[in-house]
Amino acid sequence: MTSSSTPVLVLNQISQAYGKQLVVKDLSLTLESGEIGCLLGASGCGKTTVLRTIAGFEPLLDGKIQIAGETVSRADYSLPSAKRRIGMVFQDYALFPHLTIFDNVAFGLRDLNKAEQLRRVNEALELVGLHAEHHKYPHEISGGQQQRVALARALAPKPQLLLMDEPFSNLDVTLRERLSMEVRDILKEYGTTALFVTHNQYEAFAVADRIGVMHNGEILQWDSAHQLYHQPTSPKIANFVGEGALINGVIRKANQVDTGLGMLSGTFNQQLPENTAVQLLIRPEDVVHEDDSPVKVKVVRRSFRGANILYHLLLDGGEQVQALVPSHCDHQPGEKIGIRPDVRHLVVFPL
């Protein structure tokens, strides 16, 4: 058993290259027992390469990977994948079409006796809610069910660490949202430590305890979803995570900033001297629609979202902000509407 004081996964300044192209650069992260981590970023940022180095499919150029306290990869050494006690869930599920659901899940348990195989498969299928489908073949069940079979197969050998590569990308939006929450519940119930990669931040928010935003082979910030959203450490993170806009401002006092939305007061993410020129992060929830407000702005465009409408609004100074407004307030591009800023966390970056 892994000691609770020993992290399940430690990446210590790992680097990896394809030819002369460095795709992962001095990347470090730690996952504690039972934590679910996510590497979030656009295609080509290096996140899948990180997963492949952890699994032992790629050698390291530099750095060290430890699983449950054991060094499994460094520049001159790589423990074979089969000995790392890692479970993998692939983007395409990788189920065997000629095997039943039961036999797919049992495939990685061939070293166990029949009684233990039976117990493990039944336990895993019960966990993912597919015990009644055990006799069917992959083509006889839905895409969401196939993904749960892939998860059951990965969990049945009781891996130290589960890796998932874009696990929900082949599913439609509604199923993706539901299954991502189901998968989180299953992993938490099983106490599984997991790391997955995705380009979809809403999946990352729904599933992960800790998220690493990746860009050009580096993690820009490794944090909870709440911290990434409310306390981004750079303008790049602020622009990438969630929706919002960066507008110009000037620090006037310890807790005030002068902006195109007026003089705003609140708690700053960092202390800066008076008269410092800054960019201020404005989220859609920071701008309240208020008909009686003396501050009027023009609707540039709108995005209908059912219960809400996301309005893009033009300030007098030419900058744009967004507001998320209940959809019974129906305004068209070109209209002027009243707004009131309600910015409580002043996330500023010096220019």
Image (cartoon, rainbow, N blue to C red):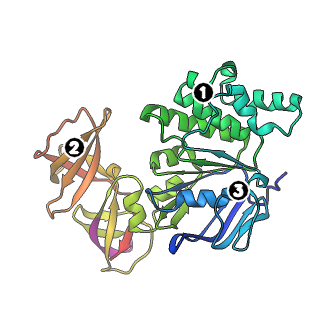
Where on the picture, by quarter, is residue 126? top right
Q: Is residue 39 visible?
A: yes
Q: Does residue 6 appear to the left or right of 256 in the view shown?
A: right
Can you say which quadrant of the picture contains the C terminus? Answer: bottom left
Q: Residue furthest front?
A: 98
Q: Does residue 225 appear to the left or right of 83 in the view shown?
A: left
Question: In the rendered structure, which disc, 2 or 1, sits on the residue that comes first in sequence?
Answer: 1
Distance CA(mark 2)–CA(mark 3): 42 Å
Where on the picture, by quarter, is residue 290? top left
Helix, strand or loop at label 1? It is helix
Q: Which residue is mark 3?
A: 32
Question: In the rendered structure, which disc, 2 or 3, sits on the residue that comes first in sequence?
Answer: 3
Mark 2 surroundings: few (<14), some (14-19) or many (≥20) residues within 10 A = some
User: Hey, what amino acid is under mark 2?
Assistant: Arg
Judging depth in this view, the residue of 281 and 215 nearest the camera is: 215
Q: Which residues are magenta?
A: 247-254
Mark 1 surroundings: few (<14), some (14-19) or many (≥20) residues within 10 A = many
Q: Does residue 30 appear to the left or right of 49 in the view shown?
A: right
Q: Residue at x 47, y 62 (%)?
A: 45
Q: Position of residue 115 (x, y in %)?
A: 88, 28
In the image, residue 181 above or below residue 14: above
Q: Is residue 212 visible?
A: no
User: Hey, what amino acid is under mark 3?
Assistant: Glu
Q: Which residue is mark 1?
A: 138
Mark 3 surroundings: few (<14), some (14-19) or many (≥20) residues within 10 A = some
Q: Position of residue 342 (x, y in %)?
A: 32, 53
Indicate which label's residue lies in the foreground, 3 or 1.
1
Q: Residue at x 52, y 72 (%)?
A: 22
Q: Which residue is mark 2?
A: 302
Helix, strand or loop at label 2? It is strand
Indicate which label's residue lies in the foreground, 2 or 1.
1
